[in-house]
């Protein structure tokens, strides 16, 4: 996006990428339908960025969700709003949009064509301030008039975003918050038993709710679904709470959320059904008949409750409505959908230029922000690329 802004303004732009082809992580994002952005109101949208709301909200004023949809339409890609409010290309694919975008950059109707340099892995700056790259043909140095860095975070390293840039910028005095997993899964304390893991890993918990309150009193309560893994939990509902859970684990070594297995039923109704006479039926058959509790939900109750707790109606009913699940660690950063941490906004100008390095701009996930899935990640990446491109244009103009 930064390259497009600069090229449209008539500047000669060279885009360097360590990978053999462009947009590998963008294409991965498209595997689930390419959730470009979200249709919710501006205030709610900006609120998704938590502690970095003010910084991202400023970027969205220049490049809003409506702007992003109009940009896609300009490439011949129509979008639609799904039932959840999320915005997708009509064909639900990333490749056609990426092809159209690259065609525009390489063969623009106006402006200057962007020059692409693949298999160029950035290794830092030389003593005289040139950018240095490792390539199959050997080392290459270039001395640009302005530089936009967009290295991504640290997740999905095989696609290019491996976080190797962090010490290079830190070595230049740039303040960088540690990269952390975001929208990630977790390991449960002590692990699942072999029986539960072998039987239920990979299966979803559907129509459940999670409740969590951190030490600062911030509450998370939401209904949805998630998946049991061999070592813990992952999936959309867990991802939505992941920043709070992760930070609690960092502070105290663990985080406990409460799982409501039947959020559509009141605690009183659940207790009444548990205590309903069951005759000769087993308790498992009774729960299945009266509350439709079976499969992975029933399995989790057996996993987490002692025999005495399971056979006590009051304790069983409480567990069905608020089963404590204690987590001991986030999954490794390379498994995460995205990352938190990165270059602090406090060391950037409003144009996203490093105050300590005039002419060097930063954009995308390498900045210190995070957001849930739902279109918020791509939207902020696009918007920051737009702002960095505009900032670089202004820098070039003011410096002749």
Image (cartoon, helix red, strand yellow):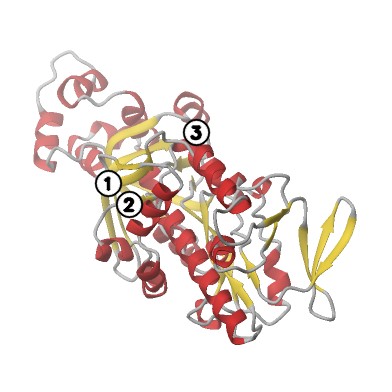
Do residues under tags 2 and 1 come within 8 Å of each other at their CB atoms? Answer: yes
Q: Nearer the viewer, mark 1 or mark 3?
A: 1
Residue receiving disc 1: 85
Question: Is 154 displayed left or right of 215 in the figure?
Answer: right
**Which quadrant of the figure has residue 237?**
top left
Residue receiving disc 3: 193
> Tag 3: Cα neighbours inside 10 Å, few (<14), some, or many (≥20)?
few
> Tag 1: Cα neighbours inside 10 Å, few (<14), some, or many (≥20)?
some
Asked if residue 323 can be seen in this view, the reply is: no
**Of the pair 352 and 179, the residue shown nearer to us:** 352
Task: Please name the residue shown 52% across and 54% down the image.
Answer: 338
Asked if residue 272 can be seen in this view, the reply is: yes
Label 3 – label 2 distance at C-alpha: 39 Å
Q: Secondary structure at mark 3?
A: loop
Q: Which mark is residue 38?
A: 2
Label 1 – label 3 distance at C-alpha: 39 Å
* Nearer-N-terminus badge (2/1): 2
Task: Please name the residue shown 24% across and 59% down the image.
Answer: 41
Q: Nearer the viewer, mark 3 or mark 2?
A: 2
């Amino acid at each position: 996006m930064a390259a497009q802004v600069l090229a449209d303004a008539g500047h000669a732009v060279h885009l360097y990428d360590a990978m053999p082809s462009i947009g590998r992580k963008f294409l991965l994002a498209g595997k689930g339908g390419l959730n470009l952005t979200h249709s919710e109101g501006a205030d709610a949208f900006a609120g998704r960025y938590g502690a970095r709301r003010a910084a991202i909200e400023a970027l969205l004023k220049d490049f809003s969700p409506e702007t992003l949809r109009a940009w896609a339409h300009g490439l011949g890609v129509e979008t639609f709003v799904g039932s959840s409010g999320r915005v997708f290309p009509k064909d639900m694919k990333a490749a056609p949009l990426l092809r159209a975008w690259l065609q525009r950059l390489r063969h623009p109707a106006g402006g200057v064509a962007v020059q692409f340099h693949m298999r160029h892995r950035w290794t830092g700056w030389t003593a005289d301030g040139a950018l240095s790259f490792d390539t199959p043909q050997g080392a290459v140095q270039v001395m640009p008039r302005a530089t936009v860095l967009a290295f991504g975070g640290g997740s999905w390293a095989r696609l290019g975003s491996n976080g190797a840039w962090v010490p290079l910028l830190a070595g230049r005095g740039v303040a960088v918050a540690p990269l952390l997993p975001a929208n990630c899964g977790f390991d449960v304390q002590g692990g699942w038993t072999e029986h539960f893991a072998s039987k239920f890993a990979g299966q979803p918990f559907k129509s459940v709710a999670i409740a969590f309150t951190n030490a600062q009193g911030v509450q998370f309560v939401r209904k949805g679904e998630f998946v049991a893994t061999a070592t813990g939990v992952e999936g959309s509902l867990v991802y939505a709470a992941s920043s709070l859970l992760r930070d609690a684990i960092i502070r105290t070594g663990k985080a406990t959320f409460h799982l409501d297995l039947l959020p559509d039923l009141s605690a009183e109704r659940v207790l009444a059904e548990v205590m309903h006479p069951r005759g000769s039926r087993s308790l498992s058959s009774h729960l299945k008949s009266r509350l439709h509790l079976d499969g992975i939900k029933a399995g989790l109750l057996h996993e987490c409750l002692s025999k005495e707790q399971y056979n006590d109606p009051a304790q069983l009913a409480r567990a069905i409505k608020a089963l404590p699940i204690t987590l001991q660690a986030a999954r490794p950063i390379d498994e995460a959908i995205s990352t938190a941490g990165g270059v602090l906004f406090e060391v950037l100008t409003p144009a996203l230029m490093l105050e300590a390095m005039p002419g060097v701009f930063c954009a995308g996930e390498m900045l210190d922000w995070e957001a849930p899935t739902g279109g918020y990640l791509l939207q902020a990446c696009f918007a920051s690329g737009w702002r960095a491109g505009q900032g670089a244009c202004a820098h070039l103009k003011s410096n002749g």
